[in-house]
Image: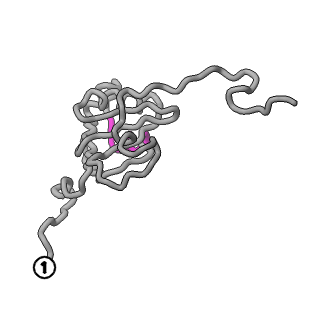
Amino acid sequence: MSTPLRPGNLPGDLDLEFPQKRSNNPMSAQANGRFDANPTSSNRAGITLMNNQVGYVVAEIMDGKPDVIVSDLPSMIRVDGQSKMEFDFAEIAEALGWDDFGSDDFEEIMSTHYGRMVVLDDRVLLFANPEDAAQYLDFDLAPLE
């Protein structure tokens, strides 16, 4: 009986390994398994970037910032931050060697996000808690009677 054809034993398959994480991601370590649900607040916000040249440069910039965890995955790059993250367009444009980088370029490389996103002319902010973004969203925090 012949061996069924599956990834890994197809003719011409390469022995590929998944890229290693740049650092341990506590988001996946909070529950028992990597993909288990954990309903408690993580106080984190994050995005998923395309794993292309521009996404890689943005991930490299964010990897150098405090309280940010960057995880390389086969087809995407995960960027998670504690409480608040800021993506400065001028900093990204300089790293890319571009004259300009804007929200349209950012939206092109970002596939998803979690947390409250605030898009400004010169940067994108991500907040873990919506209350922290109140000043940007005209969000009234006064108690209701």
Magenta residues, dominant SS class: helix
Residues 24 and 62: in front is 24
Q: Residue furthest front?
A: 32
Residue 56 belongs to magenta span? no
Q: Residue furthest right?
A: 1
- Residue at the (28%, 38%) spot, across then down: 87
Residues shaded magenta: 101-109
Number of labels in the image equals: 1
Q: Judging from the image, what secondary structure is the residue with disc 1 in? A: loop
Q: Residue furthest bottom?
A: 145
| Position of residue 114 in the picture relative to residue 111 (left or right) | left
Residues 71 and 97: in front is 71
Give the image location of residue 117, x and y in percent: 30, 51
Q: Which residue is mark 1?
A: 145
Name the image quarter holding residue 81.
Answer: top left
Amino acid type at image mark 1: Glu
